[in-house]
Amino acid sequence: MKSANSPPSRRDTGTGPGRIRTRLLDWYAENCRWLPWRSTQDPYHIWVSEIMLQQTRVDTVIGYYRRFLRRFPDVADLAAAGLQDVLKLWEGLGYYARARNLHQAAGIVNRQYHGRVPYSRADFIALPGVGSYIAAAVLSIAYEQPYAAVDGNVKRVLSRIYAAAVPVNGPGAAAFYQGLADDLLERERPGIFNQAVMELGALVCRPAGPDCGSCPVRDLCMAQRRGDVQSFPVRKKRRSVPTYRLAAAVIRKKGRILIVCRPENGLLGGLWEFPGGEMQSGESPEDAGLRLTRKTVGLNTGAVHYLTRVKHAYTHFKVEADVLICDYHSGRVRLNGPADFRWISPRSLGRYPLTGMTRKFLPKLVKMLSSA
């Protein structure tokens, strides 16, 4: 399928990197998917898409991208918005630091660059949340600047084409694969070429079950020549991630429940949840709930009812949380850890950007509270 910014077909000439470039551009012109951010040259829209696409599947991003731009169609609109509104619209997309950084960066762009995404790489990469990949992707696609964008798809493609033994998650991987990408980059069409390599990784040169028969550079791929495609990319073994046991307490008081906001600069910053924390060894969920409500919000509670257990995975660890319903007894809220709190009606929960773990037990909680 051709997109609005697909390059014209080019005759295959030359050898080595030149042949790879030509094959990839021709293949992309015929096979690239239509995606909403490929129909624009607006650097802000492309920036939003690239931020969302970090560590998130394309089919998940499409809906979020459209809703986000309907609400915040330009930098000025995003800069003027409250962080809670931004986080609520981001809810469920995960990796919320992306949203916080994008919101902060929009404020800087609006103030310092009159709402225009910087053309200068030095200025753009200095913004919160803009690393080497984001800078290269946005500047090459929106401004046709000759920067090679290297993400996980690109590393996988390059590791197979060159049968590279450097682990893609090793300490020297970034510089090594950036060097390969820089050498291969089609400088006349850097944005299209970057997208072509990433698209090949997404559609053909997949992590498992690569479709080598459909690959436009299969005869130029060293891993394919060796008959050893599945050995690439090379990865260092990761340590097993730890699992933490948590307790979360839903405190009821005169028909309202207490929610707390996580500090903006930490994990899941700016999101709302119920008071809680890590359980001690040998501690029952009920005892943990009573202890943690005193510790985190300074309230005495009782009449504990067990609701459910939920599991949730983050990048570097997993959690198992026991959720409890507690009745308020005494005390005034004194925060020790959370940044803010609200006593709200259960039906108001949907107005707040909630942590992923909280959203997992929300239907069961609402059902229980509505029948109480």
Image (cartoon, rainbow, N blue to C red):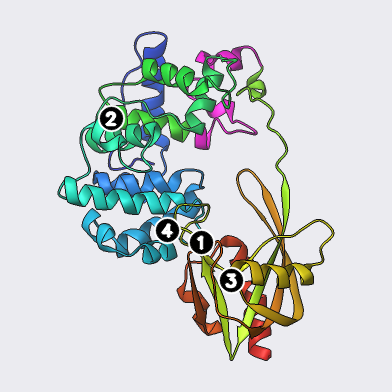
Tell me the kind of residue under disc 4.
Tyr
The residue sitting at 31% across, 26% down in the picture is 147
Tell me the kind of residue under disc 1.
Arg
Pointer 2 or 4: first along the chain: 2
Q: Is 288 placed left or right of 146 in the picture?
A: right
Cβ–Cβ below 8 Å for labels 1 and 4?
no
Pointer 4 or 3: first along the chain: 4
Pointer 1 or 2: first along the chain: 2
Q: Whole-percent x and y of residue 273?
A: 56, 67
The residue sitting at 78% across, 72% down in the picture is 286
In terms of secondary structure, where does tag 4 sit?
helix
Q: Whole-percent x and y of residue 307?
A: 74, 75
Tell me the kind of residue under disc 3.
Val
Image-quadrant location for residue 289: bottom right
Q: Mark 1 points at which residue?
A: 262
The residue lying toward the viewer, choosing from 205 and 163, is 163
Q: Whole-percent x and y of residue 74?
A: 24, 56
**Is label 4 or label 3 in front?**
3
**Is label 1 or label 2 in front?**
1
Tell me the kind of residue under disc 2.
Pro
Pointer 3 or 2: first along the chain: 2
- Mark 1 Cα-neighbour bin, 10 Å: few <14, some 14–19, many ≥20: many
Q: Mark 2 points at which residue?
A: 8
